Every structure is written in structure tokens, then in C-alpha cells.
Image: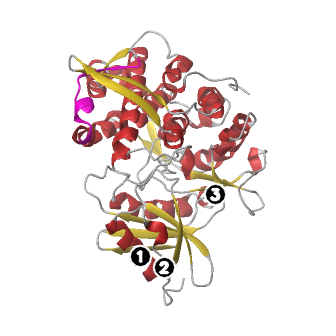
Amino acid sequence: MSTTRPRHTTGHTSTAGSAERRAIREAAQRLGLEVGQEILDGGSPARVHRARTADGTELVLKVLTAASGAVDGHDLASFRGKREQTELIRHTAPQLGARYLPVLDTIEGSGWAACTTPYYPSRDLAACLRDGPEGTRLFFARHDAVVQGLFVHGYATRTAPAPAGHLTDVNLGRFLRRLPVLRRHLPEVAAADELVINGRRCPSPARLLHRLSDGHAARLRQLAPPRLMFPAHGDANVRNILVGRADGTGADDAPEDGRHTDYRIIDPRGSVDHWDPVYDLAKTLFSLTVWDPALRLGFALDGTTVNGTPHYRAGFRRPVYPGYRAAAHHFLPYLETSEIPGLLRGDPGWRQRLLLTHALHVLAEAPCRLSDLKPKPDAEGRCAPPEELALGHYLMGTLLLDDLVRQLTGAREPDVDRHLELVTGGPGPEAGS
């Protein structure tokens, strides 16, 4: 790519902070790019823009500046690690690697890093669920293609024994390590020993996790993965799977036959360590139940403190897309008909681990919202404050974790629909369509 004719504009970066604007200008100048429209769909603090080279080639420019208080995964080390992981995938798992958008350029400055990728006309994996009644069937048809690429041709490439304590250290520990961020920004709620959410009295997540670790260690061991697999991604939310047309001409409509779905993958976790594929399955479910609806619709939160205990009503500002609700409630039954059970043979706890990891994803997202200051406009154009998004995730995650800990420590298998209904409101009229 030419770097001899720098061209850049600043009119599209007005929502960024001064350090970010400087980093975007410097990256554009060094790469010879004209910066265009900002892309606000992502869930990381990186600033993402469409851009053009001097010869008119359209790219995407992604710039991340160092920030104090950034959670793991939102830091510069993870940003740099994404390219290393992508290169490993393209070399070791080429069928999956062909589905990754390649990283073209990487540069760094003082306190920032940037990269470029090709521009791929696309919509996110869940877009069809926002389109109408036929969306649920189409979503699962497309997800079949993702299972083939990401799981069959990716995760299954190689395995390694899971270290003892992996579930506790990684899945449970991720939220606990981020909890201090929440306590700094939302002290009254995050430091409370107990909360009442939608009329349900819940111990704090920290209490619940310590109870699960200390009092039900044998149950956790039953849920733990016996092996880890090739690091195929690690953050497979629906916005990191981009669906385009099979003929490469655009993204407004893709073929309904999932086997011929054209898609590209972006933004892996940023680590080359072996990983648990169930973690990624839970990321997709989390996208459908809470994360993507929250970013697109916003939370409706109302709270007060009674005798030192926070009481909250938590929901979404607008009714959640029926397709999301249907897909979320049908997600585990769908997985049973896919190639996932074969991939996870010898791992009897994967279904319950998926539900536990899903609840922990919702909780761990709360501090993430506090280190992502990009505007998050909802369907009405209202930008939700980071604190509001953080609080909503914390409250809904607490509801899910409290219910699941009760179910996992009981005698019966978890009631999945009843559990998810705490945040979805129920499967809606399209379940199973």
C-alpha cells in the first residue's frame, strides 16, 4: 500500500477523544489513507472507520489508544495479539483461515496501535433475525456454515488436555478480575452484598461465585472441559461474523441455503493459547439474549435503595426482536442437531457449562461497557451512557447467575427455557420455526 500520498479528514472523528483523534490522523497520514465514515457497530473501544487509499481501494482502519482502566481484551496487548492469532489460524487451519478478513497493515505510535483490513460489504450474523418472521430459520442455516468453518475446520484442528482449574480460573475468574472496575464506577450496586432485581432477591455475583467454588467444587469439576482445542476465535459474538452475498456483490441479502453462505470472521480474542469452544458458543447465545439487544435497543432501568439493599427493575427500552428471542430459546436444541455434540464427545458437562459461561459473559460485559466510550445509538438514536449499559448487564447477569447456581446445585437438569426467560421474556411466537 502506498504511504507517499497521505490524505485524511477529521470531520468524521468528532465523537472521538483528542488522543484518539490524534492517533487516527497519524495512522491515516502514515498509511496514506483518507478517513471516511465511522463504523459504530463493534463492541470494543477501538475506533473503526471506512477509509480509502490513494488509488481508491476501500479499507477499514481500526485504531486503539491506550486507556487507564481498560479491561483485559480491550487493551493494546490483546489488539496486537489479534494479528498473531489470525496468522496462526491462516497457517494451521487454512480452511478456517480463508474465512478470516486478513490484516493488511499494522502500525504503532505513542500509546496507540492501528491496523487495516479489506472492506467487506456485509451484515452481522444476527441481522436476519431483525428482518422478519423467516429470520430464525435463516439464522440457523447460516450458523450451520459457521459451525463447519469455526468449529469443525477450526477448533477440531488440534486438542490439548485442559489444565486443572481452567473453568474456575478462566470463566469464573474473568468476572472477578474485572469486578474492581465496576466497584469504582458503580460502587453502591457493585459493592452490595445482596440485590433485589425484578422482584427477585439475589446474592451478589461475587458471593454466588465463591459459593459455587467453595461449596460445590465437585459440581464445577463435572462441568469443566476435559480438553481445550485450537484457538479458532475466542470472541464469536454475532457482530464478529460478517455475512455477505455468495457472489461477492454486497450484503443486503444472502442465499438462504446456509451451505453456500459467504461470511468472514473478524476480531479473534488475541491469544494463541488453546481454548474451550463452548466459550464461543456461549458468546453467540449471549449476543442473542442480552448483549446485542442492549446495544441496539438500550436498557430500561429503574432503581432505589431500601434499607441498604439496591432494588431494581431491569429490562430493555423496546421489545426485543422476536427473532432474537426465538433463536436464543432454540439455540441449545439446534446445537444438539449440529456437529457440536460429536466435536465435544467425552465432554458430558458442555451443555451446563455453556449456560454457566453465558451468565458469566453477561456479567463480565458490564466492566467492558465502562472501557468502551464510543457512542452506542439505539433504535431511536439515543446514545446509552456506558454506566447504563454496564449496570444493565450487571443486573441481568446477576439474575442469570443466581438462577443457574440454584439449578446446577439441585437434583434436576437446568430448565433452559425458564432460565433464559429471566432476560428474554420468553421464546416468542417463532420458537422452533
Question: Residue 132 vs residue 64: left or right?
Answer: right
Rendering coords of residue 21 (x, y %): 38, 70
Q: Which is nearer the N-term, disc 2 or disc 1?
A: 2
Rendering coords of residue 263 (x, y %): 66, 54
- Residue hosting label 3: 95
Question: 107 above or below 208?
Answer: below
Viewer-nearest residue: 147 or 250: 250
* Magenta run includes residue 130: no
Q: Amino acid at mark 1?
A: Arg
Q: Amino acid at mark 3?
A: Gln
Look at the numbered discs 2 and 1 and tell me whether their residues touch, using CB distance below 8 Å. yes
- Which quarter of the rendered picture does the C terminus lie within? top right
Viewer-nearest residue: 4 or 76: 4
Region rendered in magenta: 185-198
Q: Is residue 299 visible?
A: yes
- Residue hosting label 1: 25
Q: Amino acid at mark 2?
A: His
- Cα–Cα gap, marks 3 and 2: 36 Å
Neighbor class of circle 3 (other Cα within 10 Å; few <14, some 14-19, many 20+) is some
- Residue hosting label 2: 8
Q: Quick one: SS at disc 2?
A: loop
The residue depicted at 49 percent of the width and 68 percent of the height is: 12
Neighbor class of circle 1 (other Cα within 10 Å; few <14, some 14-19, many 20+) is many
How many labels, in total?
3
